[in-house]
Image (cartoon, rainbow, N blue to C red):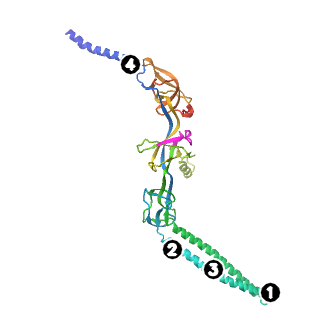
Amino acid sequence: MRKRKLILFGLPLILLLGGLAFYALVFRSSPAAGFTTGVVKIGDIEQTVLATGKLKPKELVNVGAQVSGQVTRLHVALGQSVRAGDPIADIDAQPQQQALRAAQAGVDALRAQRSARAATLVQAELAFKRQQMMLAADATARADYEAARATLDAARNDVKGLDAQIVQARTQADIARTNLGYTRIVAPMDGVVVAVVTKQGQTLNSFQSAPTIVMLAKLDVMTVRAEISEADIEKVRPGQTVWFTTMSGSERRHYARIEKIEPAPESIVNEGTASTSTSGTQASTASAIYYIAQFDVPNADGRLRPSMTAQVSVLLAKAKRAILVPAAAVIRRDSKGHATVKVVGAGGKLEERPIMVGIGDDTNIVVRSGLRPGDKVALVEAAPVAAPSDVGMDF
């Protein structure tokens, strides 16, 4: 009985002592317990600025009407390819034809009047010459001579006035002829119909603004307008390599070079309007500021489409086969590249070690000195990645 009691009371004590021994063996022998470790390795790295952009056709034209009237025929459909000069639409030409006939009739009427006045001018010239000879022979009165000269001057002025009216009437006829030509809409360039704005049978009014019939675009070259945040704009400049992917699920990179960076954000237009409308009231500055970086990319296969979203990466620096340490292991990093890591040494002990670092991304940082491939480091809160201008660029 006594032996049984000893077993019942001693067994829990033995288990407790065994647990304490196991805890001491495992955790006391590993000073790095509680830290996740990473391994220093060899690899390639790219430091980039990320941005979001929109794809637009390199050339986009609104094909519109310059005269009012009903669209009697639409020659194209959405997605159709056209060549420069191909018909796009026809507008009812009857009003323009009538205007041209009226203008041409006005020209003909003035020409007939001029012919009659020209004959009168010839008679006035002959009468004046007779009066001139008779006056020299003292065979006519001075008053008759002066009357003949006045009649001649009036006839000449009538002809000149009709000449001016004829020029004006011809101009009106040319305008009417041009307006008649505007009733046939043709493609101004090679391209693809990306939007049909006006339907066949619709009536257009061009008095206030030229109405758009279709939108025509060249899709063999696309333009990307990427929004660069004000925090990154000083790192970006024309000529830098850039690539982007689309949200179509494909990981294909489309490469280009930045062509230009607009000097002011697009929001400056709204800011100017707001400052005028508020009469000096300070506008809100809570909204983010973005600057537009623009570049073109070939689109021979037509996979890129207007208004696609582009996930843009601007290459700032890169390094190949460099020694890389996890970014989460770097602590106390300064702008000159001095940093510190905790290396897992013999027996699992952590030792703090100074290192020199270079460029980095969100995952890894280049190690210039202080670590070797295969070293294990403790992962802590990652330090901010300095710009390549601060720590040197690796190419």
- Crowd tier of the residue under label 2, counting other residues whose Cα lies within 10 Å: few below 14, some 14–19, many 20 or above: few
Label 3 element class:
helix
Residue contact at pointers 1 and 3, CB within 8 angstroms: no
- Magenta span of residues: 228-244
Label 1 element class:
helix
The amino acid type found where label 4 is placed reads: Phe
Q: Quadrant of residue 110?
A: bottom right
Residue contact at pointers 2 and 4, CB within 8 angstroms: no
Image position, residue 321 (x, y; %):
49, 30
- Compare marks 3 and 2 and give the one earlier in the sequence: 2
Q: Nearer the viewer, residue 209 or 121?
A: 121
User: Does residue 18 appear in the picture of this structure?
Assistant: yes
Image position, residue 177 (x, y; %):
54, 70
In reply to whether residue 236 is colored magenta, the answer given is yes
- Reading the image, the residue beneath label 3 is 114
Q: Nearer the viewer, residue 128 or 27?
A: 128
Q: CA distance from mark 2 to mark 1?
A: 57 Å
Measuring 29% from the left and 16% from the top, which residue is drawn there?
A: 15
Q: Nearer the viewer, residue 20 or 110?
A: 110
The amino acid type found where label 2 is placed reads: Gln
Label 2 element class:
helix
Residue contact at pointers 4 and 1, CB within 8 angstroms: no
- In this rendering, the label closer to the viewer, 4 or 1: 1
Q: CA distance from mark 1 to mark 3?
A: 33 Å
- Crowd tier of the residue under label 1, counting other residues whose Cα lies within 10 Å: few below 14, some 14–19, many 20 or above: few
- Compare marks 2 and 1 and give the one earlier in the sequence: 2
Q: Nearer the viewer, residue 304 or 335?
A: 304
- Reading the image, the residue beneath label 2 is 98
- Reading the image, the residue beneath label 4 is 27
Q: Residue furthest bottom?
A: 139
